[in-house]
Amino acid sequence: MSDPKYLTGDKAAINGFIDRFDVFLFDCDGVIWSGDHVFEGVPETLELLRSKGKKIVFVTNNSTKSREEYLKKFKGLGIPSTVEEIFGSAYSSAIYISRILKLQAPKNKVFIIGEAGIEHELRSENIPFIGGTDPAFRRDITEQDRQGLADGSLLDPDVGCVLAGLDLHINYLKLAHALQYLRRGAVFLATNTDSTFPSHHTVFPGAGSISAPLAYMTGREPLALGKPSQAMMDAVEGKFRLDRARTCMVGDRLNTDIKFGVEGRLGGTLAVLTGVSKRADWEAEDAVAVPAFYVDKLSDLRAVEL
């Protein structure tokens, strides 16, 4: 595989790069922002691409926020956007469950390990669920819980799917419920399987730290609906009617963003060095994916204005 082309500071190369694509798929954490810190020049860079007629889609694995909640964050950080430009793993999961999985009633309820973003997107598709942010599951497990889980009396017979996402209130009780549903044959889905996510200039445990213990306990791997899953790519392509050859994935992480674009046979992939992965990661012999291009930071694309 050829080495990626370094674009930073090369005005001609950046012009040529931008002209190759009609659609840009952007990761958010580590590319647009870190926590609540917007990287310098990002809003102007996005506006530049829009002024050139480029379609922008924000494809994020963070399932803690719905599209509407993400829109509030974008606006709060001074980044113009619309709900239609946002495609998160919570939304991807809801679309998959309602339009592809099509669980039949009454066994069509979802047990959620995750935050309100998942709940909101499931509601948008009229999918029944339990778990999630329900205070009944945000507590310590009791001896009565153990007995009810063991004999099944505490379980909802209508649960046919377990959906695991990033849960900031994960506990033993939630994992115990999920385990029992999975042992009884529930479909196992994950919003995404990121091991970590970047925030506040460091990394924190990602959604993969939630689904991995369940996979270990059951010997079953979940179907992931976030990057690099091609189920998500198919959903993005279907929604936006994009031409893959004229589409570029922009991200900071090799095993999600860049792999997503490479396996999706997109026309290009662009790595930025403001997040998780660094040059040494794709220069390694066992690199999970190699970008076609890279820049130090997203705002380097504004060199076309210079």
Image (cartoon, rainbow, N blue to C red):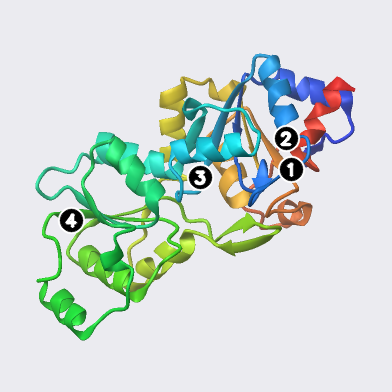
Q: CA distance from mark 1 to mark 4?
A: 42 Å
Number of labelled discs?
4
Tag 1 residue: 39
User: As displayed, is residue 251 above or below residue 162?
Assistant: above
Seen at 89% across and 33% down, the residue is 9
Lower sequence index among marks 3 and 4 = 4
Image quadrant holding the N terminus, namely top right
Q: Is residue 224 visible?
A: no
Q: Amino acid at mark 4?
A: Val
* Residue nearest the viewer, comparing 11 with 6: 11
Q: CA distance from mark 3 to mark 4?
A: 26 Å
Q: Secondary structure at mark 4?
A: strand
Q: Quadrant of residue 18?
A: top right
Q: Amino acid at mark 1?
A: Phe
* Residue nearest the viewer, comparing 234 with 49: 49
| Residue located farthest toward the bottom when viewing the structure as drawn | 143
Q: Amino acid at mark 2?
A: Val
The tag on residue 159 is 4
Tag 2 residue: 42
- The answer to whether 198 appears left or right of 19 in the picture is left
